[in-house]
Amino acid sequence: MSAEATTLAPAAAPRRTQRRGFDGRAVVPALRRKLLPFAGIALLLGTWHALAASGLYTAEQLPGPLDALRASREAWSEGSLLPHVGASLARFAFAYLAAVLVAVPLGLVFGLRPALWKATDPVIQVLRPISPVAWFPLAVLWLGIGNLPAIAIIFVAAFYPALLATVSAVRRVDPIYVRVARNFGTRDYQLVFKVIVPAAFPQIAMGLRIAVGAAWVYLVAGEMLGARSGLGFLIIDARNFLRTDLILMAMAMVGAIGLVIDRGVAWLERRLDARWGLSPEDHP
């Protein structure tokens, strides 16, 4: 190629980096996803306020959300709110962890020993439909008044969902995993903790999350029946003084704390599932 042709050839245009501009269309769906969980709460509060202001009920029968908020400030200023919340959380944590520590190992044993589970299953199915609250009179006779009856009720409420989920999860583990592990000379304890538990973990975690909800529900029932502290006791004590605003405040606290616990368990489930459970592409 001649020098003249080289001179006349157009110079290569410099490459321009394309900057992605602000895409307003992507903001609305993202904002909608962020705000959507709060829409239900806003609707609930709006319905509550509308009913309280409708005149269908007196202020003593149905205080509004602002009345409940003022009641929470009153309980906070008196220094009674945090001790009640702390007592409920302490009972819940102790009883729930105890139920999990008993139910999950038992579920692993029953799942790995079909004959043992076949003998035990009728007993479990007879006891499971009995409401935990129905055990309360016996719990008071056996354990006395105080924390232990409430803890026993929470334990019973969390025990059966955790146990049955663990048994079902272990029995559904694909036998090919066990055969492959046996072919590689895996010992029994290694088979349980390196094969069975990781394969069964997603379903076990689901059962533990159900157990959390059941335990929190019956925590309030147990505290209403015999405890001298906690949110359930606060509801009963407010009823004795016809403080409906305190009752609704305590109920709102129960719901809010239950939501936080559920979200915390879901987060922990995702973290453990990423380590032990199925990979994201394996989930349905």
Image (cartoon, helix red, strand yellow):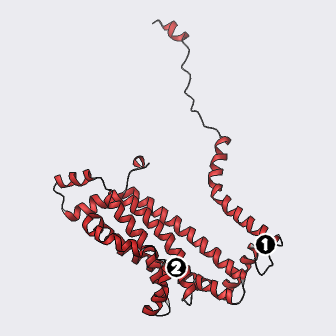
In the image, which is nearer the foreground, mark 1 or mark 2? 1
The answer for how far apart the CA atoms under marks 1 and 2 are is: 30 Å
Direction from residue 40 to residue 17 in the image, left or right: left
Q: Earlier in the sequence, mark 1 or mark 2?
A: 1
Callout 1: SS: helix
Residue 96 spot, x, y in % from top left: 44, 76
Q: Which is nearer the eye, 126 or 205?
A: 126
Whole-percent x, y for residue 132 in the image: 48, 79
Question: Which numbered disc covers residue 270?
Answer: none
Q: Are marks 1 and 2 in contact (CB under 8 Å)?
A: no
Residue at x 62%, y 52% (from the top left corner): 33
Query: Which residue does the numbered mark 1 point to in the structure image?
Result: 52
Task: Identify residue for label 2.
Answer: 89
Give the residue at x 74% y 79%.
70
Pick the quarter of the image with the N terminus.
top left
Using the image, determine if residue 136 lies above or below residue 275.
below
Residue 45 left/right relative to 263: right
Residue shown at 38%/53% (left/top)? 278
Instruction: Rate crowding at label 2 as few (under 14), some (14 to 19) or many (20 or more) other CA atoms within 10 Å.
Output: some
Nearer to the camera, 88 or 175: 175
Whether residue 90 is visible: no
Amino acid found under the numbered disc labelled 1: Ala
Local packing at callout 1 (Cα closer than 10 Å; few below 14, some 14-19, many 20+) is some
- What amino acid type is highlighted by mark number 2? Leu
**The quadrant where residue 40 appears:** bottom right
